[in-house]
Image: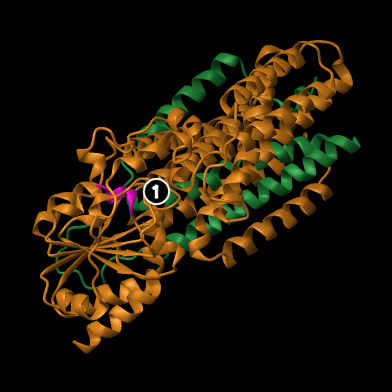
Chain colours: A green, B orange
Amino acid sequence: MTEELREGLPFVIQLTVFVLAAWVGIEVISKVPQMLHTPLMSGTNAIHGVVLVGAILVLGAAAGGGFETALGIVAVAFGAANVVGGFVVTDRMLQMFKRRPDPPDGEGR
Amino acid sequence: MDAALRADLIQVAYLVAAFCFILGLRWLSSPRTARKGNLVAAVGMAIALVATVADASVETYVWIALAAVVGGAVGAIVARRVQMTAMPQLVALLNGLGGGAAALIALAEYHRESASHAGESLPPVLAVGVMFSAIVGSISFSGSIVAFAKLQELLPGRPITWPGQKALNAIGAAVALGLAVYASFDIADPLLWVAVAIALVLGTAAVLPIGGADMPVVIAFLNACTGLAAAATGFMLDNTLLIIAGTLVGASGTLLTKLMGDAMNRSLANVLFGAFGGGGAAQATGASGEALPVLEISPSDLAAQLVYARRVSIVPGYGLAVAQAQHPVRELADLLGERGVQVSFAIHPVAGRMPGHMNVLLAEADVPYDQLLEMEEANPEFPQTDVVLVIGANDVVNPAARDDPSSPLHGMPILEVDRAETVIVFKRSMATGFAGIENLLFHDPKTRMLFGDARKSLVQLVQEVQAV
């Protein structure tokens, strides 16, 4: 087994984390206005690039084994492109969103 | 540093990263804080990555650095260079990469197990994690690539169907699942590879029959899949940060999928298996009578009408993006605004090819976001609106969705533009919309058609308005 990769968490704890995260996710996002749907999606796209963490762990522990190393390299490259591309493009998008320059009506949406 | 302390510090860093992700998402859901939110999430990611590299189990750095630099550079360059109109493709592509990474991680873990434990069975949690991320990650990968190819027009955007589609997909899914279960009880490398290969075909076969207008649902759904695949790698590697971040994305993707489905009055199953606009919906075209009258309007007449209007509403659709007409439309809105006309944009939740597509497109053209109305805000205003300009939209303004129970669109919430004084439809020709459904709005006595390329028509209209 590859215990050194694992934190050794009991399944129940993992499940707790999963359920709580799902709840937090739904609560936090449920109020997002339509105009932010695309940035939200590309932002969460960048966040699921967190698989890069897993890819690094797998590749880092692949002790010279040619095959695992090869898989790990591709996984790291994919994950890195996902993370960087996702955050950069979301930022590009969001910097375009502007309010009217001099709004006499102060009420935002 | 002593190993236990190091491990604790890494966990603390992961906790901080998870906190940043949640805060980032929270800030992403309000326009004032959205940009900051994205930044916070990126900082969280950086913290997580530094902590991971410091993990004691990581021994080989060269390959990691090399792969990360190459992947990151490609991601950065593409994200900087891509046209805003190509945003749906890019979102699909990035999503596919994440899914692919999750599947590869699962394959690598399985391979490692097969070296030391061939013929044995995987511990249950590990098995579920490996199989889920391998299968769902692969489906998300190939599905996203097909969605990308469709949006990039490398593949036709219309639904591609073949006989026995549903049955074949169901058989494929059953076989992949069966192989995955078998592979967890008897660790042997080729088994999971076959399951992954089937999953790749399955993802392709699932997205090919889906037409362009259903893309917002599909892209949101694939986003949820990749998130959950990432969470599964967390179960596999016993990594709480992966579980938290992946689940957050899974939750948001699921929510968006539901929102998009509601906006079309269709369930996810209906989108995935309906091949809308293919066989099922086509017969509806025959229902309408032939040779209904169509009234045209010239740009100069329209310009005069617009200048003397009090309230004008613009309804953009995917056609606006295709014609790259976002800049001329903003010019028109500004010109009319200067003349005291009250101009707003009414945006249907599924207009375009991804959730929020029109908002991004108009933001690129510097349309201030407080000028954009969501469907619920726009509909009560149409009865007091003098002129509605429908540009490159069709099904989302089809009154049949509201009035005709026999229409395949029936029940889909629409922008009720037919309640306005006059409706002007910018259209290339009288061809039916994506769903192949006749739109009686075009034959309404208060409707005028402005045929031609939306961009050219708008440029001409801007000139005419300046001349009035």
Q: Is residue B297 above or below residue B92?
A: below
Task: Determine which residue is flagged by label 1.
Answer: A37
Q: Who's the residue at 69% across and 21% down the image?
A: B176
Q: Out of B129 and B323, give the one closest to the viewer.
A: B323
Q: Quadrant where the C terminus of chain B lies?
A: bottom left
Give the secondary structure at mark 1.
helix
Count neighbours of disc 1 (C-alpha within 10 A) and say few if under 14, some if 14 to 19, many if 20 or more.
Answer: many
Residue B421, position as x, y percentages in the image = 11, 61
Q: Residue at x 79, y 23 (%)?
A: A2
**Could you tell me what secondary structure mostly forms the magenta stretch?**
helix
Q: Nearer the viewer, residue B461 or B74?
A: B461
Residue B333 located left or right of residue B189:
left
Q: Is residue B246 left or right of residue B27?
A: right
- Residue A82 lies, in percent from the top left, at 62, 49
Percent x, y of residue A25: 42, 34
Q: Start and end of the magenta stretch?
A: B394-398
Could one spot residue B281 in this view of the protein? Answer: yes
Q: Quadrant of residue B340?
A: bottom left
Query: Depth check: B188 or A92 in front?
Result: B188
Q: Is residue B397 magenta?
A: yes
**Residue occupying image coordinates x 82% and y 27%:** B111
Q: Residue at x 46, y 28 (%)?
A: B269
Residue B434: % across, % down: 42, 49
| Disc 1: host chain | A
